[in-house]
Amino acid sequence: MTDISSNISRLRSELPSSVMLIAVSKTKSVSEIIEAYNAGQKYFGENRVQELLDKKDHVPADAEWHLIGHLQTNKVKYVVPFISMIQSVDSLKLLNAINNEASKVNKVVNCLLQIYIAEEETKYGFSMSEIESIINLKGLDGLKYVRICGVMGMATFTEDFSQVRKEFSCLREYFKILKAGYFNSETHFREISMGMSGDYKIAVEEGSTMVRIGSLLFGERNKNKPV
């Protein structure tokens, strides 16, 4: 049986205080999430909107939820009222949808720009040139209900850790370019979300401020997801 509390304590002792631990709770039961919560974990990441909706009301209200999976525009309205951060913003269309739904509830939504850094076609994300083009064409102007807080990326799923390090380093450099060129006066633009259970140590070395960890906390993924 997985000792979630001990796993959280161990990871916290390893991570710098400047790095936020996001517990990836996809496929995990409410009881497992509450066990993590009772161990002091307040930040949870979910990939699917419906699974998140099924869980959130069964977890203490001060838990903070991060949407870390691909988000369809027609599902934005369901998460905007309560979400703490949408880490997986991968298109201008999605940014506009978030802004539109957030305006209806008068809430500013924290977002990260997901940048494509992996050598895998299954990954989502902006290219750096797309982001710069959107900014230069004033595509972000008028998005009063969106707060862009930084970038997110996923490395290639590989045992070649030199490639993983290269991709994380690339994301860090993209962050620096965006910060210096476009968000220099924005104090909230400070997050680099990268690193998961298999590569978080490399991510932290390369400047991650948020790591998204599931199996090292909760054990291996449940194929049948009890709630």
Image (cartoon, rainbow, N blue to C red):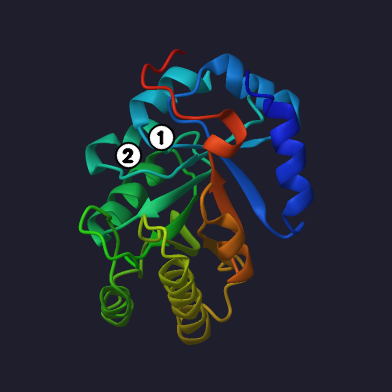
Q: Residue at x 35, y 33 (%)?
A: 48
The circle on residue 150 is none
Q: Nearer the viewer, residue 17 or 184?
A: 17
Q: Is residue 195 above or below residue 212?
A: below
Does the CB distance between marks 2 and 1 fall below 8 Å? yes
Q: Is residue 47 above or below residue 121?
A: above
Q: Is residue 63 above or below residue 173?
A: above
Q: Residue at x 67, y 21 (%)?
A: 35
Q: Residue at x 71, y 37 (%)?
A: 8
Q: Nearer the viewer, residue 155 or 209?
A: 155
Of all residues, the one furthest to the bottom in this rendering is 181
Residue 166, can we see it?
yes
Using the rendered view, name the quadrant where residue 19 is placed.
bottom right
User: Callout 2 environment at 10 Å: few (<14), some (14 to 19), or many (20+)?
Assistant: many
The circle on residue 76 is 2
Q: Amino acid at mark 2?
A: Val
Quadrant where the image shows the N terminus: top right
Give the secondary structure at mark 2: helix
- 182 vs 63, left or right, is left
- 126 vs 224, left or right, is left
Residue 59, can we see it?
no
Q: Residue at x 30, y 61 (%)?
A: 125
Task: Give coordinates of residue 52: x percent, y percent.
Answer: 43, 27
Task: Give coordinates of residue 173: x percent, y percent.
Answer: 48, 80
Of all residues, the one furthest to the front in this rendering is 159
Give the secondary structure at mark 1: helix
Q: Which residue is mark 1?
A: 79
Q: Amino acid at mark 1?
A: Val
Task: Give coordinates of residue 145: x percent, y percent.
Answer: 44, 54
Q: Alpha-carbon distance for marks 2 and 1?
A: 6 Å
